[in-house]
Image (cartoon, grey):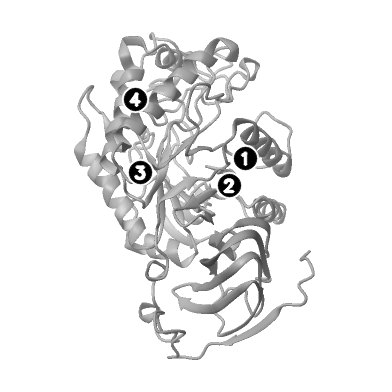
Amino acid sequence: MRLPITPYLLILLSLLAGCSDSDNSSPVNQGTTDSLPAVAELVTLRPLSVSDDLRIVDDLDREVLLRGVNLNSLGEYWQGDPNHQPTIAVNAQDWQEMAARGISVVRLVVNWSRLEPQRGAISEAYLDEIDEAVSNAADYGIYTVIDMHQDAFSAFIFTEDAAECPSGTQPGKGWDGAPQWATLTDGLSTCITGERNSPPAVIAAWNHFYDNTDGIADRFIAVWGAIAKRFAGRPEVAGYDLLNEPEVSRPAAELQPLFEGIFARTIDTIRQAQEGQQHSQLIFIEPGVAAAYPEFGLIVPQLEGVDRHNIVAAPHNYSESIDTGFDWSIEETTDVFMTFATFLGVPVWVGEYGFWDTSESTVDKAKRYAADQDANALGGARWQWRQGCGDPHSLSWGGTAVGLVIHLNAVDCPGDIDAGPTEVFMRILSRTYPRMAPGRITFLYSDSDTGDFTLQASAAPADSEIIIWSPTQADTHTVESQGLVNLLSHRVDGGRIIKAMTIGGDYTLTLSGDLAPL
C-alpha cells in the first residue's frame, strides 16, 4: 500500500510526437524503435563506491540500485551432450533488449579455466572477450560485475562411465570453474550421493584449493590481479565477485582461517592493481555454504584485518525456489542477509535469485521477491538471461535436454530454439525503479502489474539529478512530486527515463496512470 501523498505538486505530462522536453534532452516521438533515443544517451555510468552509511553510490553521492541479470555466454561448462554447446553467444540484439527492459547491470560469468588454461599463462584473448562484453554493455547503459564463477569446482570432474558408480550413487556431471591443471582430486570417486558438490573428487579439489596445494590458490589470486589490472579505473565495471558459491568442504571452524586468508589476499591483490586510479571498483564477496554436507556449517567472512571500504556482501537468495538447506521464506532470508551485512559493516547486493516455471504459485513468489527487494531498496541479478540445451543445468548425465528451459528468455530443447522472452518474469524485472537517487532511499514501492510507483528519500543535497527507469510507453502519465523541480520524461526504447532535480532535503516521487507496459 502506498503512503499518503498530499499535498504534492501535480504535474501532468502529455508527451506528443516530435516534442522536445528541453534543450539537452532527446526528442520524444512515436516513430520506429530505431528512432528513439537509447538509455545510454540519457544515463552516464559513473564510478561506484560504498558510502559511510552503507549504500552503493556513484561519485555524485546518489544511491544506485544495480538491477539486472546473470549472463553466462562467456563461461566454459562441461559439455555432456556432444550435439549441443553449453552456452549461447550474446549478441547486439540481446544488449538492446536488456536496455529496453531497464536492466542496469549484468553479472558476467567468467571462468578460471578460460583465464588460465595453462598454468602461469593468462589468456589475453579471453580478457579481450570479457573486455568486449563490458564495452558492449556500457554502450547500452549497463554496468558489469565480473563474476569468477564455479559450480562443483570444475568442468573437469565428471563420471566417464556410469558403471563406475556403485549402487546408491549416480554418475556425476561436470560443471565449470577451475582449469584442469588446478583440479586435484586424488583420483577419488566422481559419483554423486545427492548435491552436485557431494562427490569425493569434488570435495578433495576444494580442500586442495583452500590448502593452496602446489600453489594453486596463489595462481587464482594472480588471475584476479590480471583482471583488475585490465579493468582498473573503468567506471563501467561496477566491481568483481571474487568466487561464486564457495563450498565449505570440511568443518567451518577448521576451514574459516584458510577461507578468510584467500579472500584477504585476493582483495589486497585487486587493490594493488587499482593503485594510481581515481577510483577503485567494488569487491563482492559471498559466504561459504556447505551445500553437499550441511553439517560442516556456514562461513560468513569476518574480514578481520581487511579494509572494508568498497566491499559488498553478495549472497544468493533461492529461498522458496530451490532447496537451500534452510527453511526460510524469501523475506526471512533477506532479513538474515541484512543483519549479517550490518554486523560486518557492508551493504548487500544479491548476486543470484530466480524462478524457472510460470505457474501461478511461482509467479506469486517472484512478485513477492520483487516487493521484498523494493522494501529493502536492494539491487541484484536474476539467474539468468538465457540457458542453452547443452548447459549442465539443463540436462542429466548421459541425456539430452527436452522441453522448454525457462529463464528471462526461454529456449526450446533439444533444438536450441529461441522461444522468446518470458514476459511474466520480464515484466517483474523491468518494473519502475530509481537507477540513481540522491540522498537515502527511505521508501520504495513498485507494482509490476499496474505500474504504480512511489519513491521517498531523505537528506538529498540540492541540485542533484534523480534518474528513474519506467517501462511505460504511454504518452500520458501522471507524476506527483515534492522536493523536486525540472521534471522531465524522456521516451526511450522500451520505456522512459524520468529525470528531476532536487531542491535539498526530503523528496517524494510517484507515478500513476497508464503506466503498465504496452
The answer to whether the residues at label 2 and label 4 have Cβ atoms under 8 Å apart is: no
Mark 3 or mark 2, whichever is nearer to me? 2
Please identify the quadrant where the C terminus is shown: bottom right
Looking at the rendered structure, the kind of residue marked 3 is His
Sequence order check, earlier mark of 2 and 4: 4
Judge left or right: residue 465 versus residue 388.
right
- Snapshot quadrant of residue 511: bottom right
The vertical placement of 304 against 441, above or below, is above
- Mark 1 residue crowding within 10 angstroms, few (<14) / some (14–19) / many (20+): some
Give the alpha-carbon distance from disc 3 to disc 2, as whole Å.
24 Å
Along the line of sight, the residue nearer the viewer: 491 or 200 = 491
Give the alpha-carbon distance from disc 1 to disc 4, as whole Å.
28 Å
The vertical placement of 364 against 318, above or below, is below
Task: Confirm whether residue 113 shows in the render.
Answer: no
Looking at the rendered structure, the kind of residue marked 4 is Ile
Sequence order check, earlier mark of 3 and 4: 3
